[in-house]
Amino acid sequence: MPCTLHTSLRSPYARKVRIVLLEKELPFELSIVDLSARPAWFAELSPLGKVPVLVDDDGTRVFDSSVIVEYLEDRHPRPPMLGEGWRQRLRHRSLDELGDFVADQAVVAFQARDRGEAVGAALALERVGRALDAAQARLGTDEWPSAFGVGDAAVISAVGYFVLRHGDAMIRERARLAAWLEAQHARPSVASTVPPTIT
Ligand SMILES: N[C@@H](CCC(=O)N[C@@H](CS)C(=O)NCC(=O)O)C(=O)O
């Protein structure tokens, strides 16, 4: 029986988990939760009221994207998505944090803009800019994990979401990062999880 990943349509955190599930070739079903409706069954399932939540085939329930990835790695270690050895794991976890930070701040900027809070939105975008600079500075160095894994998935997913909400100007300004991102789309797990555009 496949596991179920509860997600919203465009969640960057859930996309990270989906990429990991696909890379590990684990069968899963998607359950799309309408977060604006907040159905009662979902409130019972998710202690934080957030997606993603994974329900495994034996009923094991896991929330928070990074915890889900750690759980999947524990139960299905191959291929490793957290890297081999402490150095690689540290690099993946650091990039995972960096990616999640970009996603968090993309949401903050979007909500601030929606409320007409220009200063708050600008501050969040400034934070995104610094995180993107940090990611780009790591590219091609020892600080970047040597094999594809959750760190890459987190950055790809966060930037994909950021572009949906805020356009791609800040990414194009960082040419090395933009080229790296483009190249990642040759990977089926990345290409098949691109979020639907907002019309
Ligand atoms: N740290 C969490 C963040 C999850 C998160 O913020 N999810 C958003 C959707 S992208 C959500 O469910 N928001 C609903 C809410 O905050 O009420 C993770 O990595 O899973």
Image: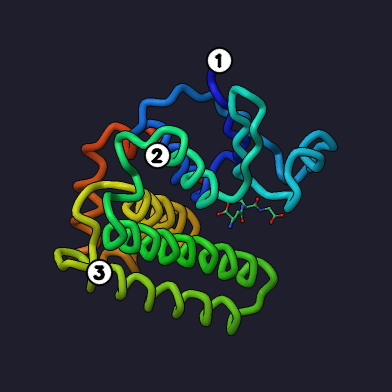
Residue underneath mark 1: 1
Can you tell which mark lies on residue 137? none
Residue 137 image-quadrant placement:
bottom left
Q: CA distance from mark 2 to mark 3?
A: 22 Å
The residue sitting at 53% across, 44% down in the picture is 68
- Place of residue 153 in the rendered image (x, y in percent of width and height, measured from the top left): 36, 49
Amino acid on which disc 2 is placed: Val
Say which element carries label 3.
helix
* Mark in the foreground, 3 or 1: 1
Check the image and name the residue furthest to the top.
1
Mark 3, other Cα within 10 Å: few <14 / some 14–19 / many ≥20: some
Earlier sequence position, callout 2 versus callout 3: 2
Could one spot residue 199 in this view of the protein? no
Residue 133 vertical placement versus 157 (above, below): below
Query: Which residue is located at x 29 percent, y 32 percent?
Result: 188
The residue labelled by disc 3 is 136
Amino acid residing under circle 1: Met
- In the rendered structure, the answer to whether residue 116 lies left or right of residue 192 reads right
